[in-house]
Image: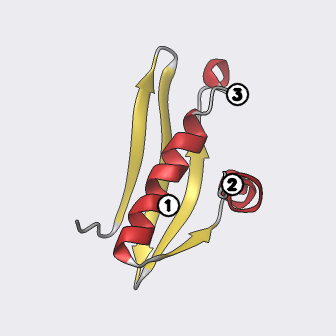
Amino acid sequence: MEIKGEGEFFVETPHGKAFVKYKIEANKIIIYQTFTPEEERGKGIATELTKFIFDIAKKLGYEIVDECSFTTYFKTNIKQI
């Protein structure tokens, strides 16, 4: 697997797209925005998307750099679950 440049991982919900946006620099995945439609918040969607990108980073040996508040929260409070 290879990911380059900038992109997003997303899922369509009944109320719009939930996503995690990232950019790649060297061996780092920089997560700069996470969004879930208001009606879908609290259902774990952002958590699952963030877990997915953390799993990819681990497989590629990349470091995660968090530039959005949800990713910071995830690293501190959820990642070990």
Q: Position of residue 73 (x, y in %)?
A: 75, 55
- Contact, mark 1 vs mark 3 (Cβ under 8 Å): no
Q: Quadrant of the N terminus?
A: bottom left
Work out whether residue 49 or residue 35 is closer to the camera in this orientation and state it: 49
* Residues at marks 2 and 3, CA–CA distance in whole angstroms: 13 Å
| Residue density around tag 2, few if under 14, some if 14–19, many if 20 or more, within 10 Å | some
Residue contact at pointers 2 and 1, CB within 8 angstroms: yes
Q: Amino acid at mark 3?
A: Gly
The kind of residue tagged 1 is: Phe
* Residue type at the position of mark 2: Phe
Going by the image, does 58 lie left or right of 60? right
Residue 64 at x, y = what percent?
54, 71
Q: Which residue is mark 2?
A: 74
User: Which disc number belongs to residue 42?
Assistant: 3
Give me the residue at 67% from left, 24% from top.
38
Per the model, the C-alpha gap separating discs 1 and 3 is 20 Å
Residue at the far left: name it. 1
Tag 2–tag 3 contact (CB < 8 Å): no
Along the polypeptide, which appears first: circle 2 or circle 3? 3
